Amino acid sequence: MIRLSPSILSADLYCLRDGIDRVRSCGVDMLHVDVMDGHFVPNITFGLPLVSSLRKHTDMELDVHLMISDPAKYAPLFVKAGADIVTIHAESQIETRETLRSIRYEGAKPGITINPNTPLDSLFPYLEQVEQVLVMSVQAGFGGQSFIPSSLKRIRELSLRLSENGLKVPIEVDGGIGPQNAMSVVEAGADILVAGSSIFSTNDGDIEGNIRALTDAVRQARNRTS
């Protein structure tokens, strides 16, 4: 089953509860939360209080992506705040294995990711330790970027690597995903699609219609590969 993980980075924060309720009413059971510190990436977004508030008010799976310089310090705190999945960047190079272990120890699923310009094999040492691998199809740090076409090759290569090693780790893809390319991304091997602008910021905020368009594209891809 292909899952959607709507990125609240693109949501109307003034009406965030309404946006979350609307995606939930469409059967979506996962939310993507981008945490940026203004150092590892140039933007600043959400923190622990938001994750804690979300946990109090929704049973959706909270998919937290840490784009921060010190994941070793903060990853366990995000788990305690209510994150179900915590994904860290291999580029941070700060106690990566120990950080992944601490995420699992605190009770969440550990994930690993890299930016598009980082060699794919930087992920390989951690594949047996994680429960999700995130392929960034844009440069981490800003919403609304265009999908990088070469990401499809990276998804295929990662999918092959996982298969060759007998690992059933979901591949999540984040960046520039919409109905126009969702089919190709799924056919390349993606299991989870992160979508922000294409859900929250297009078609005059028709969240339900945007989700239908994405799920229709995913369904077509599944029909073609079955």
Image (cartoon, grey):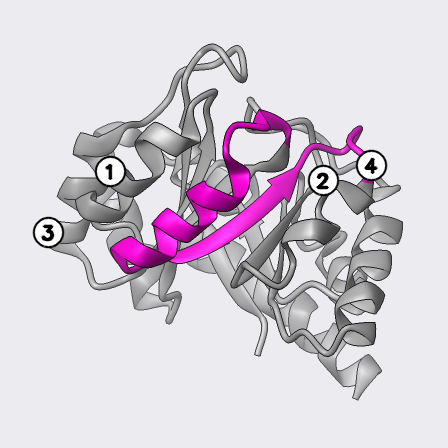
Is residue 36 left or right of 154 when viewed as pictured? left
| Circles 3, 1 touching at the beta carbon (< 8 Å) | no
Amino acid under label 2? Ser
Q: Which residue is mark 1?
A: 77
The answer to whether residue 64 is above or below residue 44 is below
Task: Give the label, 4 or 3, closer to the camera.
Answer: 4
Looking at the image, tell me whether mark 3 or mark 1 is earlier in sequence order. Answer: 3
The answer to whether residue 73 is above or below residue 222 is above
Q: Residue at x 86, y 58 (%)?
A: 157
Q: How many angstroms separate mark 4 from mark 3 (CA)?
A: 38 Å
Amino acid under label 3? Lys
Q: Which residues are magenta?
A: 91-119
Task: Give the label, 1 or 2, closer to the camera.
Answer: 1
Looking at the image, tell me whether mark 4 or mark 2 is earlier in sequence order. Answer: 4
Q: Which residue is mark 2?
A: 137
Q: Which residue is mark 3?
A: 56
Is residue 24 left or right of 183 when viewed as pictured? left
Q: Where is residue 155 shown, x and y percent of the image? A: 79, 55
Amino acid under label 4? Pro
